[in-house]
């Protein structure tokens, strides 16, 4: 049988396609299976799990806006204990790769959840969401390179076999560039890998999370989100995310051979293709699932046709192949 031109690997993980389901948009584990054949996607990323259960923000916490979606869910999830009891045992039955998403408000939070997921053999990778504010420093992990480096070091220490992905915030404060933050995640300093073939830093970068945004009801003069501000996702942020992937790839990921997952406004196959040419090895679909739950399949089909038209055998040959001049 001829190998699929879109079959690929991500930090050594074999994937049927480079199209993944993003955290927070596909349920805690398999809820999307009612609307989408999970065997035809590259991976599903779980809802972000925190140490303790969270109810999240009050409504309204998700709403449509022009060319996208605003959300301020507030990390609503069942918590680590319930995840390990009710969901982790079912991960082995999911017909695709399962990536566990982790969030928290302190390094200790991340480490505890990471250690729990490392014990689940059917979860081969964890994605840490570093857009959360640290309760001790009152700053996002993803906007403070030394703090992020410390987080990566400590999480890496408890991962004996699981790959570590870092999901970056699109915003870096002050004179920082996202490449500076990415470098801190990839090269966090004196950290000794604990498992076979582990890197000192993360195994892949996920670029990027939602853009900070808000909406106002001009009649009532009230914020439309109960949390006042939230995150913007969807087509409106896609060109921004493509540039972020391009910048991180050229500045740090290419030379360190760190895979990138492109995230932001992937609704059609050409959105995914843009990410791949900019330097992404895979993409995640989030907002697109709300518009069309089956879109990951059509995206993968479109990528397959595109790969053939480009005259290469596999999608991996097109990663970072943007031509900056004719």
Image (cartoon, grey):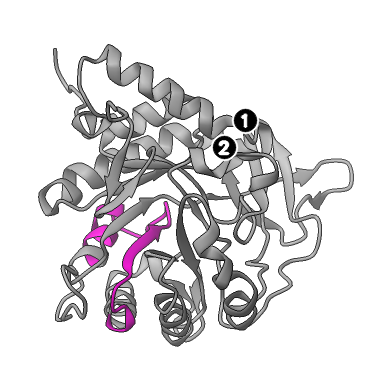
Frontmost residue, 198 versus 132: 198
Frontmost residue, 168 versus 101: 101
Label 2 belongs to which residue? 234
> Which residue ends up furthest to the right in the rendered image?
220
Mark number for residue 123?
none
103 over 277 or under it: above or below: below
Label 1 belongs to which residue? 67
* Quadrant for the N terminus in the image: top left
* Image quarter of residue 130: bottom left
142 over 149 or under it: above or below: above
Element on which disc 2 rests: loop
x and y percentages locating residue 296 in the rendered image? 52, 34
x and y percentages locating residue 22 in the rendered image? 52, 50
Frontmost residue, 268 versus 325: 268
Q: Is residue 176 visible?
A: no
Q: Is residue 309 visible?
A: yes
State the extent of the magenta-drawn residues as a range: 157-184
Which residue is drawn at the image coordinates 22% and 69% (left, top)? 201
């Amino acid at each position: 049988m001829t190998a699929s031109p879109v079959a690929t690997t991500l930090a050594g993980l074999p994937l049927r396609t480079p199209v993944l389901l993003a955290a927070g948009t596909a349920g805690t584990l398999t809820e999307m299976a009612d609307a989408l054949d999970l065997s035809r996607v590259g991976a599903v990323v779980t809802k972000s799990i925190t140490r303790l259960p969270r109810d999240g923000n009050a409504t309204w916490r998700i709403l449509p806006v022009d060319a996208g979606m605003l959300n301020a869910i507030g990390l609503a999830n069942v918590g680590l204990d319930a995840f390990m009891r009710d969901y982790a045992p079912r991960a082995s039955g999911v017909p695709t790769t399962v990536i566990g998403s982790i969030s928290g408000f302190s390094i200790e939070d991340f480490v505890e959840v990471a250690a729990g997921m490392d014990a689940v053999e059917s979860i081969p990778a964890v994605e840490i969401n570093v857009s959360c504010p640290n309760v001790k420093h009152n700053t996002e992990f993803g906007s403070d390179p030394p703090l992020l480096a410390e987080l990566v070091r400590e999480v890496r220490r408890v991962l004996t076999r699981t790959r570590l992905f870092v999901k970056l915030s699109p915003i870096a404060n002050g004179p920082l560039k996202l490449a500076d933050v990415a470098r801190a995640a990839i090269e966090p300093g004196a950290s000794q890998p604990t498992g076979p073939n582990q890197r000192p830093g993360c195994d892949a970068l996920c670029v990027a999370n939602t853009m900070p945004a808000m909406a106002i009801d001009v009649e009532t003069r009230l914020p439309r989100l109960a949390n006042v501000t939230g995150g913007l996702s969807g087509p409106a942020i896609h060109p921004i995310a493509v540039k972020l992937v391009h910048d991180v790839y050229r500045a740090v990921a290419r030379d360190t051979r760190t895979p990138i997952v492109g995230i932001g406004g992937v609704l059609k196959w050409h959105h995914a293709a843009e990410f791949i040419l900019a330097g992404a090895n895979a993409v995640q679909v989030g907002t697109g699932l709300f518009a069309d739950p089956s879109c990951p399949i059509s995206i993968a089909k479109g990528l397959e046709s595109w790969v053939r038209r480009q005259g290469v055998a596999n999608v991996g040959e097109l990663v970072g192949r943007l031509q900056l001049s004719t």
